Image: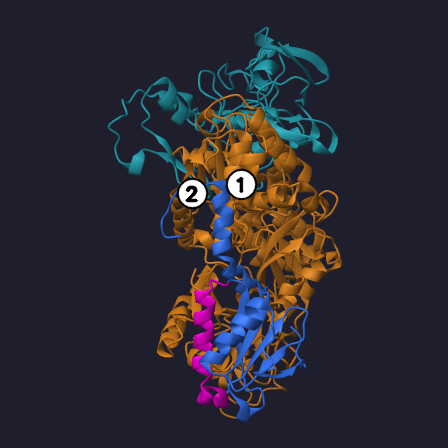
Amino acid sequence: MITFRMNGLEVSAEEGWTVLEAARFYGLEIPTLCYYEGLSPYGGCRLCVVEIGHGPKSKLVSSCTYPVEPGLVVRTDTKRVIAARKMMIELMVSVAPSSKVLQDLASQFGVTKVRFEPRREECILCGRCVRMCAEQMDGKAIGFQQRGYKKKISTPFDLKSAECRLCGGCIYVCPVCQLRCQGPKAETVLCNGCLAMDPTCLDHYEDLQCWMYDAGRCGTCVREKTGSRP
Amino acid sequence: MAEKKKLRIQDLAKIREKTKALTTIRESEGRAKITVHMGTCGIAAGAREVMEALLAEIRKNKVQDVIVATSGCAGLCNREPMATVEFKGQPPVKYADLTPQKIKKIFAEHVLCGRLVPEYALAVGSETVY
Amino acid sequence: MKHYRAHLLVCAGTGCVSCGAFKIKEALEREIRKRKLQDEILVIATGCNGFCERGPILMVHPDGVFYQQLTLEDIPFLVEEHLIKGRPVKKLMYIPPAEKDPIPRMKDIEFFKHQRLVVLRNRGRIDPEKIEEYIAFDGYEALAKALAKMKPEDIVAEITASGLRGRGGAGFPTGKKWAAGHAAKGSPKYIICNGDEGDPGAFMDRSVLEADPHAVLEGMIIGARAIGAEKGFVYIRHEYPLALKRMAIAIDQARDYGLLGEDILGTGFAFDLEIVTGAGAFVSGEETALIASVEGRIAMPRQRPPFPAQKGLWGKPTVINNVETWATVPNIILRGAKWFSGLGTKTSKGTKIFSLVGKINNTGLVEVPMGITLRDIVYGIGGGIPDGREFKAVQIGGPSGGCLPAKLLDLPIDYESLTEVGAMMGSGGMIVMDDKTCMVDIAKYFLNFLRDESCGKCVSCREGTQRMWEIVKKITEGTGTEADLALLEEVARTCKDASLCGLGQTAANPVLTTLQYFRHEYEAHVLDKRCPAGVCKALIRYVVVAEKCTGCQSCKNACPTQAIKGTLKDVHLIDQTKCIKCGACQEACRFEAIEARREEAIAIV
């Protein structure tokens, strides 16, 4: 058992756990995107960053790839962490505004403006599809090509793949393929519709139904808040 | 050095010995420096042959720690070919009216054994210091 | 060994080779054979001499005379005068700018005088393709000492005591890394030499590999002994063909002599290595990305821990060090940690090689003790700024480093002092800029480089560099706003904070340092729509100054788009609709009658 500190609490974890796994075990919420249970961690989306260390030497690391070590000091919601998370979401929404997952994250973390020219590429290169195909479906049909701003995911030489068995695993795990609800301002870069609404679900349900879980499914969010938007 | 056998530690020092000429010349750290004066007058009088004879002696005796240099006319054109022998820290010695035989003797006596050859010497000391 | 009375050392580093050094060498050999001097005079090709501004370069020994900027026509005269008649040729020697008399001896020239050669001790002095010449100058003595007289722990202790820090950029204490590698459990262990020098303007590692590959090999064999590795890899980028060639020759010769392979020097120690060629990515200079590349995978970094010293190549303990670091090791072992730690500052020991390039008189490669000031390098060794222009900034550390202004010229160079002011030692690239350089344009240049070279794994770097570049581009085109400046800074800070590897974490440095020290230039671009240095094409307009124009028509003839109208002896006029802002007219004018002025207004239609 390895003991370390998280958000001021002394916690224990098994050797080989990552900081993310330990945090989830203790019920601490850390948002993730490229992380998917059952697939190897990638550390690319930078949403799960946490701040480790003290003072001027403290730094941000992705908790999904950082192994727990004795004496570690982790803080999951510092100023730097929040600023980083918000910027990552803003950058990703500008690339893939049609993704429900990203729009929900934007509302969840208070990202209310996207100051970049949208590119609408609809792929944020989280790599979930690549890892799903290689690790769970044993297909290895797709992979990363090129680097930097030209990076994309495709089959070797963009040719029709002989390995692909059309299982649909890649589509299943893709966060962008989960399309956003066609609520108010559906064609904008950033919707934030849920932020403007008054959840009416509590009139009908015991538990809150909105963007923390499944946005738009219950169909009861119909009242718009009066007054100015946040 | 052509045969490539696997080296042992002591072989490193042996190679250094064999290549001592390299350090001598490239670091300008010779025990002695012999300057053969080769202005147009010197060459006309036979300085090239003197130079060749000197180099042959050096090779024959496998000497690694002397520097051979050339320079322009020394000034005394009717006494050419001339050569100057300088040891570190000592005043230079000018030799005049040289021939290949004379330079051989000067090399054997002065450069190898440190004994000046007075019958060929012109002067001791000059404005240059090595 | 055949005795030659004179050795001619022709500099054959890549810089001089591209100026025709091999042709010069052939011409020398031809002329010497013609004069029947081939038994008296030896001609060899060495690695980079360092004074790249003045190539092709020739050193004549034992005289120690330095010849520069040679042409093929000079050779017969040089051989006749210097080698036969003994009269060194003054007109081929180095004359400092603003002076009249040549300086014959290399050791008296300012550029060389202030340098302290440790890693580069053999530069310009040996034929890198002959192992015997390396041995002649105490080569492999350090290895003999390490294998015969020291235990692996002693070697690690000596390197730790010397205070040597990694020369690749981060400056991590080498002794600490070796100790971790030594203590790590796992077998086999590997060592790797990182020769993937990617910074634009940096050629330190290239020069070491071309001039003295055996120094790197010796360091690696010693390191392998210290750590307990039996296999090593020398990773050289494929853009360095001469370095690859010379390293391959060096490795073959070392193997022939039993310095690599089984039973090295008869001590029973076995170690061998091979060359791995890079595939054209700047990011593969990052440790974990390099390991991925050696393994045959795409070069993308991964987070550490676990560190390569514990789990590196193929999951085994691996110690990676930079070319310069490896080449320093034999010096430390031979001359002692105490000697090494006597050079430099308290926290940064020893010497460092810098490639001094850009707007500087003496472009070249310099090795100086740590702690020397920027001013001494730029003005003392570098000889100041050419054409009488003013110093504006010096970029240190490549795209990961920062631009430092004139007020920091008296900063002593060491790892900590540079990080404190927002820059970084980096691998040692030093680009000097004059007052005709636009700092916003420089930021754009480096961001363009980084967005292309980013591996693309993490959002903060991939999207961050792309978006930062877009914003800076907007600013150079005159459409930037104050909000853009604020956004630029925000993206820069996040990119620095959240990125996975060193590339991303330092990608924002060019932006952050130029914003810190040259904010007024950004503001001029954004608020005044003006480029003070006259570089950003969209923000300048070339106009003819009527009072100075003599109507000579030089500009009209120089213009590639026929944008200048005017008849002989009449004041000329530039048609702005045709002008492509190439500046050819300004260069052609002999009366300084053409000025680059700020755009009056940019109409957005």
- Residue C372 vs B118, above or below: the answer is above
**Whether residue C566 is visible:** no
User: Of tags 2 and 1, which is closer to the observer?
Assistant: 1
Residue A90 x/y as whole percent = 57, 35
Q: Mark 1, chain letter?
A: C
Q: Colour of chain B?
A: blue
Q: Residue furthest toward the left?
A: A162
To which residue does mark 1 refer?
Answer: C143
Q: Mark 2, chain letter?
A: A
Q: Colour of chain C?
A: orange
To which residue does mark 2 refer?
Answer: A150
Q: Residue furthest toward the top?
A: A206
In the foreground, A41 or C186:
C186
Residue A163 x/y as whole percent = 26, 26
Q: Residue at x 37, y 47 (%)?
A: B4
The chain painted cyan is A
- Residue C37 vs B12, above or below: the answer is below
**First to last magenta residue range:** B40-63
On whether residue B59 falls in the magenta region, the answer is yes
**Same chain letter for marks 2 and 1:** no
Mark 1, other Cα within 10 Å: few <14 / some 14–19 / many ≥20 = many
Residue C146 x/y as whole percent = 56, 37
| Three-letter code, disc 1 | Leu
Give the dominant element type of the magenta stretch: helix, strand or loop: helix
**Whether residue C227 is visible:** yes
Q: Which of the 4 image quarters holds residue C31?
A: bottom left
Q: Which of the 4 image quarters holds residue B71?
A: bottom right
